[in-house]
Image (cartoon, rainbow, N blue to C red):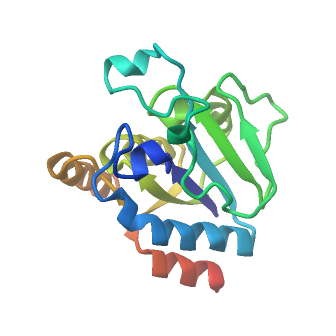
């Protein structure tokens, strides 16, 4: 089992953040429960983290956000999960020897909203690291970064579960469309309580 913690950074999660996702702060208690469980049970966790520089190409589509070195770029639950941690740079690549280590927290930096724009993560996906693996996805935003993470994992042959009470979308219409798209792709939806019961068992 792998947890995917998508873009849970101040600029997305907090009112007043540069690219605040409406009501994102309301799922923080569930995010905390999930990430604490990851530490308690040694669940490998991959946290995506936008790490922008002024003038990045993505700012043609979205307002500037998550500028590296600013508070807005920091994860709202920065000390979780309590696991050995590896930070993966934007320019990192996965070579033939790269493997995911059990019970490790990977913080994968990226410049665009697709988590798999990271060549390091894309390399692991291409080599089958997520095939048949239960992948639990939560974070923001449902209709952007969560969507591409989920569909990317489906493409990788993963068994994907989306934690419906630990995600939030930018707009109701696009969020509804995204949920429908995920269901059509065979994605299973679950809750924080159900995930915690599963990992506890």
Return the residue nearer the eye: 15 or 45. 15
Q: Is residue 95 left or right of residue 11?
A: right
Residue 13 % position (x, y): 41, 52
Res. 166 visible in picture:
no
Q: Quadrant of residue 26?
A: bottom left
Q: Is residue 38 left or right of residue 198?
A: right
State the quadrant of the C terminus: bottom right
Q: Residue at x 72, y 75 (%)?
A: 40
Q: Is residue 48 left or right of residue 42?
A: left
In the image, residue 149 above or below residue 77? above
Q: Is residue 73 left or right of residue 44?
A: left
Return the residue nearer the eye: 155 or 70. 70
Residue 29 % position (x, y): 47, 72
In the image, residue 169 above or below residue 62? below
Res. 75 visible in picture:
yes
Residue 177 % position (x, y): 19, 49
Q: Residue at x 37, y 37 (%)?
A: 18
Q: Quadrant of residue 69?
A: top right
Residue 56 % position (x, y): 47, 16
In the image, residue 10 above or below residue 35? above
Q: Residue at x 66, y 31 (%)?
A: 123
Q: Residue at x 75, y 68 (%)?
A: 42
């Amino acid at each position: 089992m792998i947890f995917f913690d998508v873009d849970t950074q101040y600029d997305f999660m907090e009112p007043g953040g540069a690219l605040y996702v409406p009501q994102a702060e309301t799922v923080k208690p569930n995010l905390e429960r999930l990430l604490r469980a990851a530490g308690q049970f040694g669940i490998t966790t991959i946290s995506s983290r936008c790490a922008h520089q002024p003038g990045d190409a993505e700012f043609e589509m979205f307002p500037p956000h998550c500028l590296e070195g600013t508070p807005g770029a920091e994860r709202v639950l920065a000390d979780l999960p309590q696991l050995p941690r590896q930070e993966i740079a934007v320019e990192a690549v996965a070579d033939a020897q790269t493997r995911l280590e059990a019970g490790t927290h990977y913080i994968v930096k990226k410049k665009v909203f697709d988590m798999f724009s990271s060549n390091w993560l894309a390399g692991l996906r291409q080599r089958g690291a997520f095939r048949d693996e239960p992948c639990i996805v939560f974070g923001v935003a449902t209709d952007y970064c969560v969507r591409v993470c989920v569909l990317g994992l489906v493409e990788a042959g993963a068994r994907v579960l989306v934690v419906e009470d630990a995600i939030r979308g930018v707009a109701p219409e696009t969020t509804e469309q995204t949920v429908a798209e995920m269901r059509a792709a065979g994605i299973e939806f679950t809750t924080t309580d159900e995930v915690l019961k599963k990992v506890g068992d």
